[in-house]
Image (spheres, grey):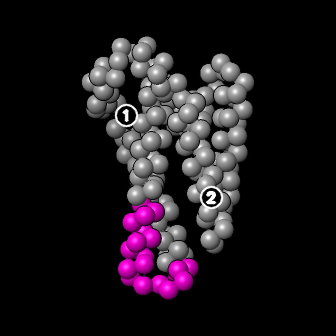
Amino acid sequence: LEATSLLSVTAALAVVLTIAIYAPVQDSIVNSGGIWDIFVKNMFCPDTIFLGLGVTSFLFVGQHSAFIVARSLERPTTQRWGTSANLALSLAAIVSIVCGVVGYLGFLDKTEGDILNSFLDDESSAGRSLAVNWARGMLAVTMFF
């Protein structure tokens, strides 16, 4: 469990890092009139609120894994489980925020549900295409493990 979890987390971090590096954030901000204009226009979008709630509710599908992880601790105490859970949730929150903010700022209203699919229209460089395809492979690794 330790090795596969490490592989899965490393692959997920690689996906987020690829998105953070290759998303065209600066171009989107400049073309939209600045970060403040993006913030004001997109603060609350009633047309897509139920889509957002659906995505948020999907986050809870992995809670059954908590019992497997809790039983896999070397010395399973409440304090160790609390530390492990807090670190895991903090890392997940940071990764989700980075991926969400950078992904949205990079593509704005053209952002796809799978952020890696947003890169399909943008074939501006071979390096970017290779990196995004590599990230797709890493995403597959996270699903497998």
Q: How many marks?
A: 2
Disc 1, SS: helix
62 inside magenta stretch: no
Residue position for label 1 = 48
Q: Residue at x 28, y 30 (%)?
A: 43
Residue 30, placed above or below residue 95:
above
At label 2, the amino acid type is Ser
Q: Nearer the viewer, residue 49 or 38?
A: 38
**Residue at the (62%, 21%) spot, across then down:** 122
| Residue 91 sits above or below residue 129 on the image | below
Q: Position of residue 132 (x, y in %)?
A: 66, 35
Q: Which residues are magenta?
A: 71-89
Query: Where, quadrant-wise, is the C terminus in this rendering?
Result: bottom right
Q: Residue 118's x, y, as percent?
A: 57, 29
Q: Amino acid at mark 1?
A: Thr
The answer to whether residue 88 is magenta is yes
How far is mark 2 from mark 1, CA to CA? 31 Å
Q: Nearer the viewer, residue 61 or 70?
A: 70
Q: Main secondary structure of the magenta part?
A: helix
Q: Nearer the viewer, residue 54 or 6?
A: 6
The answer to which image quadrant residue 133 occupies is: top right
Residue at 41% over, 44% down: 97
Residue 39 falls in image quadrant: top left
Residue 22 seen by the camera: yes
Helix, strand or loop under label 2: helix
User: Is residue 33 placed above or below 7 in the rendered structure?
Assistant: above
Label 2: how many Cα within 10 Å (few below 14, some 14–19, many 20+):
many
Give the label on residue 8, or none: 2
Between discs 2 and 1, the one toward the N terminus: 2
